[in-house]
Structures are given as C-alpha cells and as structure tokens.
Image (tube, grey):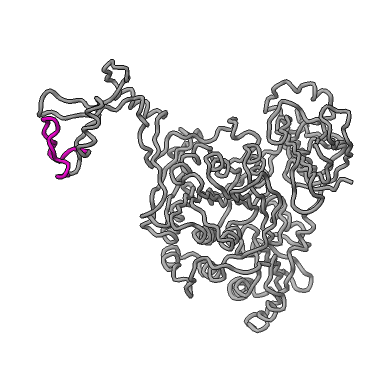
Amino acid sequence: MPIKYIPFIPEPVEGQAVLGNFNRILKYKGTNDVSMVLQRGMPLYEMEKQETVGDNTDGNMVIRGECVSACAYLKEQGIQVDLVYIDPPFASGADYAKQVYIRRNPKVAAAIAQAEQELDIDELKAFEEKMYGDVWDKEKYLNWMYENLMAIKSVMSETATIFVHLDYHIIHYVKILMDEVFGEDNLINEIIWRRKQSVSWATKQFGITNDTILWYANDADEYAFNQEYSLNDENTQKYIAERFVFDDNDGRGKYMKSPLVNSLYRPNLKYEFHGIQPPPNGWLYKQEHLERWFQNGELVMPSDPSKRISRKIYLSTYQGQPIQNIWLDIPIANPMSKERLDVDYATQKPEALLERIIKASSNKGMLVADFFGGSGVTAAVSSKLGRRFIHCDIGVNSIQTTRDRLKADGAAFDVLEIKDGVQLFRNPVQTMDKIKTLIPGLKNEDSLDSFWAGAISDSKLGMIPVYVPNLMDSSSKLLDEVTMNRIIHQAIPELNSNVKKVIVYYIDITGEDEIQRFIKEDDSTAVEIELRDLKAVLDDVIIGDYAEFHAEEAQDDLFGGWRVTVDKFLSDRVMTKVHEYNEKALLNAGKKGFKPLEISDEGLELIEYLSLDCTSATGEWHSDSEIKIDKLGYVILNGVKSKDFWDGTITSEKKPLRLKIRNICGDETEWVIE
C-alpha cells in the first residue's frame, strides 16, 4: 500500500479545472476517472536500493517501477529534472518481443575449441519472448498518458523541457494533451525524424518512414538550447561542393561568399563602409564586426562602390548547416550495429538521436530523465555527455539491460526498486497472462466488457464476472472508494441482469473493512461483491531457479583468490518456453527438417549473467565480480568484452558470500555461499 499520495500539481483545484479542454475536446469514456485519479494524487511507495555501482556522487538512478510512482518519489525527495525524453508505447496495436538466445554449453569441449572463431548469428539457437503488448483502447491510453504527463511535469524544473516521441497512430491526440498540460504557447518544435529511407511493404499507400517528436517547455521564454549543425549529411555535402569554390591561394583554403545584406529594415545598420554605400535595408552586422573581418582579410570588397560586400566563410571553420526540425541524417539503429549487440529491443532508438536531443537541450551537469527507458539509450548517452541521469522502466529486462550497459560504460549509479507489492513475472504482459491461468475457473467471456478479465461459472450462481487490476496502469492498483465507486455505478450496471455476484481482485487496498463498509452503505446494487487479494495469486507466479555449485580457494592458480564453479542449473520457466517453442516449431515445420532446441543435463546454456557479492551476505547487492555471457557465447568480465567462451566458473579476489545468477529470460536468483 502507498505510504501516502503526493499532489500532481502544487495546488489541486476541486474538480481539476485544468481538465476542461481535455473533457470538452476528447469526450472519451473514462475522462472522469482520470480526474478522480489526479485528485487522489501520485502514490508514493517505499523505495528499496538493490545495488550501487561505482561511487555515484552524482546521484544517478536506474529505477524499476512505473512512471507515476517514480515521479512521486522524486517529488518527495525534492529532485527536479532539467530534461525529459520519453519514448512511450505508441498505441500501435503491436506486440513487442525480444530474442532469447540459448548460450553455448561450457561443458562441451568442441564449443571451447571454437573460441577463436567468429560465429554466424544465424546459427544461434533462439526463441522469442513477449516484452509488452502495445494494445490499448484509445480512451484508456489517453487517460494513462495524461496521468503520466501530469506526473512528469510535477518534477520538471522551471527551465526544463520535454521531448515526447511517438508515431502517426496517436501523435495528434497526444499533441492535444501536451497543449493542455504544458500550454500551447510552450510548444517549441514538432520534429520529424526520418527513421529509414523507404519501406518495402507499402503497396497501397505512401511508405511511412518517420516518427514525430514533440518538444515542449515549462516556460518557452527560458530554457536551455544549444544550436547544433549538420556537416556530414548528403544535403550539406552537396551545399559545400556547390558553394565553397573560391580560393585566394593564401593557404587558408576554399571559401564561399556570404552576403551581408539585411532582409529586414534596420536603420541603425545603414552606414558607409570603406566607400561602399549600405544596402537599402542596411548591413547584416554592426560596423565593428565588418571592420574586424576587413582587417583579417575576410571580406570580398568590390571595385565598384555600387556593388555589395561579401564575407568569406572558410571551409576549414565552417560548422555546417543549422539543424532544422526535419531530421533526415540519423538512421534507425541497425540490428547489426555495436550499440544493438546483445540488446535486441525492437523499439531501441539510435544513440545519435539522443545525442542530438541531449546536446541541444541541456548542459553538462544537468539532470536528464527517461521514464520509459527501454534499453537505456537515454541514460547511456547522458552519462557519456557528462549529464546526470534517471532511467525508469516497469520491465525487469529493461533494468537489467540498462544496468549492464551502464556498467560496461563505467558509469556510476544506484539500482532502485519501487516496492508496490507486486513482483512482476519479467514484464507486466506475461504477468497478466499468467495470472489469468492461475485464477481457478477463470475463462474469457465475450459478452463481458473489457473492464472484466473474464468470468467463473458457478453451478448455483451462474456466471461470476472477475475484475483483475491492470499491472501497467498505476491508477488501478489501489482499490479505494474511487475505484469501488466506478465498479458499483459504472461496471456492474452494464452487466446482464442475471449476474448475482462479482469477484474483485486488488493489489493494494485502503482497508478491506473500509471498502466493505463503503459497499454496504452505498446500497445501490443487489450484486454480491467478493474482494480477493491478488498477491496471493502472484506468489504462485514467482518460482526460483535451481543451481548446484561449489566454491574453492584458488591458491595454486595464477589468479589467486576464489573460484565458484556452477555444476548444474535448472529453470522451470525457461524450459517451459523452450518446450513451447519446440512444439510450435514442430507443428509448423513438420518432422522433416525440424531441429528442436536441446538443453544439456547441466543446463548451463540457460545462464546469461553471474555475480559474486564478497561484501555482504544480506541486503543491498554488491557486485564485486561479475560475468555476462553474450549471445555469441563470449564472456564480458566486469564490463570488459573478450573473445573467450565461458568455462562454467566465476572468480573473485575475496571470499564470495553470495552468488546471483540471471537466466536468459531475465529471472535472477540469489544463493548464500556457505
């Protein structure tokens, strides 16, 4: 249950008058719900530090949790961000998955013998695992986005700006929300980013090759902006070839002539310069600037006083063309590029895109936040550019990928987790799917509204609709009078009149006695309402992996220190995915030519990452030594890549107290080393 609720805005207005335009323009079902959520405020949960990497004097954070709860924590701590970039779900209706690669078995001598050979990625054995489903009802998506935008705005500094990255599916609706939250006058730019040159699948339409990025300020009169220039793109290179054609053979190189004529009438800039009369509107610069360039030989002076003076712009000092709002020079991150290696986020954005945004709209030392952080591109680029960073994401895979990425870059940061009472099964989508299989008797029911997860058939009561809160929607996690009021007065009245009972699951509750009293006092429905704690179901979702290992002091080894050898590793969850893959592949391909994924008895192919804590046997994790096995089977030792295959061991200088193993799907399990 939340410790408390923190207002979205400093002085909430009764009825949230700020929602007036939102309600009037959109008129979607659920706008009243978001109004009530905003009145309730942002839920603040306990925050638990999982790990500290480096000295972290800058207070960098990698947070596992939802945007709204993360903003509640930041606001409670008095932390304000200077720049926000978010790349939220696009409401595209697509499911996104990551490739899960089976690692090489270190017990097989033949594999070790190939350590110096480069393996073809196509040879790797892999299966897909769904990360999240970008499937939303429009009104639910917009309410969810509105809630997140309000939360983000509450932690932005007065001079902060925000970039919201979306595509054609929903950008026009979100533009209305942004106008509502930040004000129409605070729109700085609508940026068009061409992701690719063309698409091959567009046969009955023009190919869609762009995304849209909306850039808003808290205050359009005061915010950071550093002009950037494009030099190496095709258009600029063509411009250089056409314009830089003059050369005085004085060792300065080629230059172009730039007119000094003002396009606007500036009487204060109308002056005679070395016998040359000014243009009708005046010169482009003050006289002292022209005089300095004249003395440096950087002006082209005409022999005819009626002609115009030009400035020499030398190619050696030319910065390029100022960047405009249409970005054609940054391609999408190539699947084979180094920045994509071993990450496999389908929606990962290129580092060059974030580099442009961060350089242009922040200065060194400023705090950059990404509340839908994905693979950690924003945090990684921020760190490289000398900015502080906050990475937030609800998915454990995102946190692991970002943590490993930042560790390899030598960044310092804390890994934090919002303790909202829910231990997710890798990601919310899989958790929701799993929950529905764990609720006894729950089946889909086409006659029910999407508000209900399904129904249970009872011999006496008939159909019993079941409500399960959406783990991706922070507003539904708490069962309070607001939510119960919606269930009683909106959801239940839409049910068939034969329904006699409903079951309502909750994650957090303001108090079961309080809600039962509210139901009784309301007295507006004859339908029985049974309350159930969802955490009892979630407990069945979390199953730890099994490992056999032994630790020994390596006194006679050149390394010295300690060695932990993993003898056997079992993961029921991963094996379930492997079996599912084999069954589907066999069904699709038939017996002919089918090669199933095979896992050895030792099961070491299922391990992606190992870490030893030599500092403490309990509490916050200290990664004193760690190994990551990439999808090619090579070892990344303490963030440093190698061309060695993993040999089934991990070493440390000090005696290890705990071992952590992450399987290839992202589940982490810890063991105390006796």
Q: Is residue 190 above or below residue 528?
A: above
Q: Quadrant of residue 148?
A: bottom right
Q: Is residue 24 left or right of residue 549?
A: left
Q: Position of residue 199 (x, y in %)?
A: 49, 34
Q: Is residue 412 above or below residue 174?
A: above
Q: Is residue 398 above or below residue 69?
A: above
Query: Which residue is at 24% across, 35% downward?
Result: 289
Q: Quadrant of the N terminus?
A: bottom right
In this view of the protein, can residue 224 be seen by the observer?
yes
> Is residue 512 rendered magenta in the image?
no
Q: Is residue 368 left or right of residue 519?
A: left
Q: Position of residue 481 (x, y in %)?
A: 62, 75
Residue closer to the observer: 449 or 292: 292
Query: Which residue is at 37% across, 58% downward?
Result: 184
Q: Is residue 495 above or below residue 314?
A: below
Q: Is residue 69 left or right of residue 102?
A: left
Query: Which residue is at 60% across, 68% downward?
Result: 5
Q: Main secondary structure of the magenta part?
A: loop
Residue closer to the observer: 213 or 674: 674
> Is residue 272 rendered magenta in the image?
yes
Image mark count: 0
Q: Tell me which segment is drawn in magenta.
A: 265-284
Q: Position of residue 543 (x, y in %)?
A: 81, 52
Q: Is residue 173 left or right of residue 288?
A: right
Q: Position of residue 252 (x, y in %)?
A: 32, 20
In this view of the protein, can residue 29 be seen by the observer?
no
Residue closer to the observer: 24 or 276: 276
